[in-house]
Image: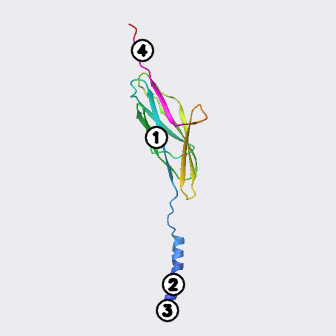
């Protein structure tokens, strides 16, 4: 009986080790997210026109949860649902589509947004965002489109 207990004590850890090597437990990779605020400001009277802001991933960057946002008049909306699994720079283009609202001039600039994903010492990931407005080289304070409503000229009497 003593021999069976001693043999069990030797073979049981070896069997557990073999099982652990053959059937590894899943390891979950670090994942980081980001939120990109977009502001639309409409100057002038009747500033309630809706506009659509779209985001396009560049260079195989992961797409956010939604590809476009509708903002009524002036306000801020957020692109969400970004998911990054590895460090790197991920780039996106953000544009505003014009509307057919009468007497409204829409901002035609676009932004190139970069999301830099870096590793943390604990194995997690950090994100940092910045944007550059088309025609400029400096980082923008925010992604902001400024539209203008021009009231129609009074008819000559």
Query: Could you tell which of marks 2 and 3 lies nearer the N-terminus?
Result: 3
Q: Which residues are magenta?
A: 141-154
Q: Secondary structure at mark 4?
A: loop
Q: CA distance from mark 3 to mark 4?
A: 105 Å
Q: Identify the residue at image location x=52%, y=88%.
A: 6
Kindly identify which residue carries mark 1. Answer: 67
Mark found first going from the N terminus, 2 or 4? 2
Name the residue: 54% across, 84% down.
Answer: 10
Which residue lies most toward the front here? 141
Within 10 Å of the Cα at label 3, are there few (<14), some (14-19), or many (20+) other Cα atoms?
A: few
Q: Are marks 2 and 1 in contact (CB under 8 Å)?
A: no
The numbered mark at residue 40 is none
- In the picture of the structure, the residue carrying the numbered disc 3 is 2
**How many marks overall?**
4
* Disc nearer the start of the sequence (3/4): 3
Q: CA distance from mark 1 to mark 4?
A: 37 Å
């Amino acid at each position: 009986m003593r021999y069976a207990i001693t043999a069990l004590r030797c073979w049981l850890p070896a069997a557990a080790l073999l099982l652990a090597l053959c059937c590894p437990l899943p390891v979950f990779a670090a994942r980081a997210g980001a939120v990109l605020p977009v502001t639309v400001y409409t100057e002038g009277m009747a500033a309630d026109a809706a506009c659509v802001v779209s985001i396009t991933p560049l260079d195989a960057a992961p797409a956010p949860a939604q590809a476009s946002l509708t903002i009524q008049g002036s306000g801020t909306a957020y692109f969400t649902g970004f998911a990054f699994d590895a460090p790197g720079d991920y780039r996106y283009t953000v544009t505003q589509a014009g509307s057919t609202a009468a007497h409204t001039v829409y901002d035609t600039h676009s932004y190139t947004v970069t999301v830099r994903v870096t590793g943390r010492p604990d194995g997690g990931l950090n994100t940092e965002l910045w944007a550059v407005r088309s025609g400029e080289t400096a980082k923008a304070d925010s992604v902001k489109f400024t539209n203008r409503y021009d009231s129609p000229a009074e008819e000559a009497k």
